[in-house]
Amino acid sequence: MKLTLKIWRQKNCKDKGAFATYVVDNVDPEMSMLECLDVLNESLIERGELPVAFEHDCREGICGSCGFMINGVAHGPERATTVCQLTMRHFKDGDELVLEPWRALAFPLIKDLVVDRSAFDHIIEAGGYISVSTGNAQDGNTLLIGKETADQAMDAAACIGCGACVAACPNASAALFTGAKIAHLGTLPQGKPERDRRALSMVAQMNAEAFGNCTNIGECTGACPKEIPLEVIARMNRDYLLASCKKREDVPTTITPGFELSAKR
Amino acid sequence: MTLDARIPAGPIEQAWDKARFDMKLVNPANKRKHSLIVVGSGLAGASASASLGELGYNVKCFCFQDSPRRAHSIAAQGGINAAKNYPNDGESVYRLFYDTVKGGDFRAREANIYRLAEISNHIIDQCVAQGVPFAREYGGTLTNRSFGGAQVSRTFYARGQTGQQLLLGAYQALERQVHAGTVTMIPRTEMLDLIVIDGQARGIVARNLVTGKFSVHIADAVILATGGYGNVYYLSTNAKGSNATAIWRAYKRGALFANPCFTQIHPTCIPVSGEYQSKLTLMSESLRNDGRIWVPKLKGDTRPPNEIPENERDYYLERRYPSFGNLVPRDVASRNAKAVCDEGRGVGKTGLGVYLDFSEAIARLGEKTIRERYGNLFDMYQRITDEDPYKVPMRIYPAIHYTMGGLWVDYQLQSTIPGLFVLGEANFSDHGANRLGASALMQGLSDGYFIIPYTVGNYLATNKFAKVDESHAEVQSAVTAAQQKIETLLSIKGKRTVDSFHRELGKILWDYCGMARTAQGLEIAIGKIRALREEYWQNVTVPGSGDDLNQSLEKAGRVADFFELAELLCIDARDRNESCGGHFREEYQTPEGEAQRDDEHYSYVAAWGYRGPDAPPELNKEPLEFHYVHPSQRSYK
């Protein structure tokens, strides 16, 4: 197959950036989208040009490193598929594909298709955990957790933190990402003691990171390669509301250093 | 060099208790005065950083990815072993120990493995407490499944994403410590050298991958948890970024490298489809619980699988190994797949594949049950191959997956450089010549959560640390050397890309030092690797500059190290004149074609020392003694 790739090229966040057009011959339908970019990059290097920078690591759809827009759709046209597992058989000979980085205020661009998603780490840091230090655990079977509950927690825990939800959202909201962790931990009995505090802190951090608000559009779940259900956002809102009603003055909604960084941008 | 593994004397059941009691402790108030460096944020690195942070040490954790949550532990699918015996099927700490010693083909230390088996149960408890959503029964108890190389169900799992869930648990514990201020996380940064002062590991030289800036980090001890070196083969199941640079630079600073030729070839991966192939995708070993492996009895049978009648199929694992059947260990399964393909009975376009068939399991259990157990793996297979494994058998072929070799460490997980500790896949310690399925996650977390917090404390409490700053001559020379290497790579401006060299290097290794090796072939490989390395330093082209994000430059440095490591790997394989586990020398096999060990001459750990760029490495031997599990010919028949 022969494909035309229109790719966003930008040296760094201060550079203006523009689309560049490349033609790739001999695209094999069995290739992944990233292998197609590998082929392009090899030819660019041989011609003495700079290769396209894009993030990737496991290439098995689980590390969450990769991701960009293909023709305006996060991770491209296939349902529940990251770009590393998107095979070229889904395109036709002669197609033109427009590749752009995630575009969101909270994800500043680093180079070409690479953006900075450390805002996600700051949200987890604010409370996306159960406070149990090593050595404190009782036997794993002491706490019985019904299969349905465990499955529900697992559905939310499957998030890979790729950022497609933010890129797909017209508001660039991180509600699906934040909701997924709040739902995962809040569903399990182990996560109950910190449920209120977790919801308050994580939502506060999410807001501080320059993500937009959720207006229930649902593009996020449609773009999510792990099909995280929209109900995790409802779960987050419920936990946040309940916690706000019960809130005492001493419950921290502290903001980590990410806030200052984001505010400066 | 005499290698002292520092294994506590006395009965193996009490060794770890005794070792812990004998260790010196650091006063709680003094812990924050000690700084520690952890390189790598996978299961071992993240769990170590979190646990050391919880104790109050000052920890800096580095990873090359944009976030610690991306480390390649995340891709482990099948599960994690523990000796809980919840299924009441005969499991015990001793049996997990026994199976692991035997599975490793008697080439690992008994004491380390016994400790691993003991700690396994605590890992499950810790992970449950963190909120890892392990699979559960309707009654609420934890579920187990079987895995290769074992006849008991001891594997805990979270769908086909166990590594992801365990890593996220460790990552969250790490982020909790970042929040508490005990751990500083430094992502998008690569370690380029180890700083050794007065014989002690005292810090690292690192490079920021976005700005290209070099930095020096000084500490009282350095902990490497940087994973394995499977990517030396180019095509492997490792992540594209997985590399050996940190352990290789440590080797060149004096740490011994043990058993580099012990590499694991995983039997169930999706076969290669073309020249552009950038990596291989694993299908979890757990699939062998319900899938049956077969090839046609006839050579060159090109009929579609569903048209081949039952009596014309060869379920070769069930035929050759009736008691373990499809659940033989990985090395045995891989070798047998190669053998039937070499006979011309392989399937698929390339003839390099065998069938993994679920039709019988689907008929017996129903599609719903199979979907619940393996749904995400089946989806992944279909996404990549465009074939529906619920209807047609999967095609699989072995691929490089894990490296049992790594930096030599003693019982305290300390390398031959005092103050340099090595955890997880980066060390050599627990799996011998073949790792059993679901044991890698166990080892990574055991090292990070439950061993290093004690042993590093003992080291800190029993040593003195002179003040070191960046102006120290050793520090400056390490920085200059690292900078020069980057500049050299950028200035060659040859004709070939880094990837083209890496691909060719991988092909040499796979052909001569893959599933079957010979002394003659290894000799050829060493010659080819040297010639290619020479060409690399004259003809590689690295575009761009060293002062911004330059992914070609990152790769160029890593491939330069892979060249040197590849040679050591072949030297070790050539030197070990026996077959054991994943190391199969064609000259040494039983009449039935199984690996033939030579315990009289090779029951040792081969720990190689660096002696300069042009000198051959020095072989040091740590003899292996087996007081509990008597070495025997492994039999899975």
Image (cartoon, helix red, strand yellow):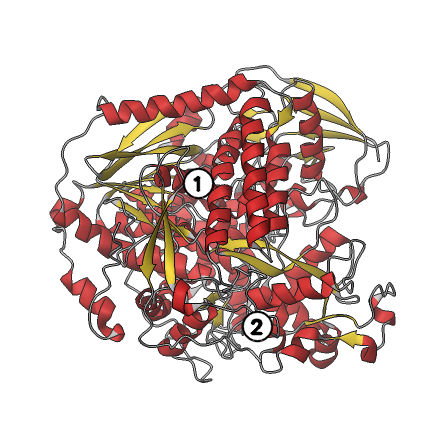
Asked whether the viewer can see residue B275, the reply is yes
Badge 1 is on which residue?
A: A121
Q: Specify the label residue B317 is tagged with.
A: none
> Above or below — where is A196 with respect to B278?
below
Asked whether the viewer can see residue A217, the reply is no
Q: Secondary structure at mark 1?
A: helix
Tags 1 and 2 in contact by the CB under 8 Å rule?
no
Q: Which residue does the image show at 13% across and 49% down from the upper left? A: B462
Query: Residue A223 at what x, y percent from top left?
Result: 66, 44
Residues at marks 1 and 2, CA–CA distance in whole angstroms: 54 Å
Observer-nearest residue: B21 or A246? B21
Chain of the residue under label 2: B
Screen quadrant of the C terminus of chain B:
bottom right
Chain of the residue under label 1: A
Query: Residue A217 at what x, y percent from top left?
Result: 65, 42
Q: What is the number of callouts on the image?
A: 2
In the rendered structure, the answer to whether residue A80 lies left or right of residue A96 reads left
On whether disc 1 and disc 2 are found on a single subunit, the reply is no
Q: Nearer the viewer, mark 1 or mark 2?
A: 2
Q: Amino acid at mark 1?
A: Asp
Badge 2 is on which residue?
A: B590
Query: Residue A46 at what x, y percent from top left?
Result: 68, 22
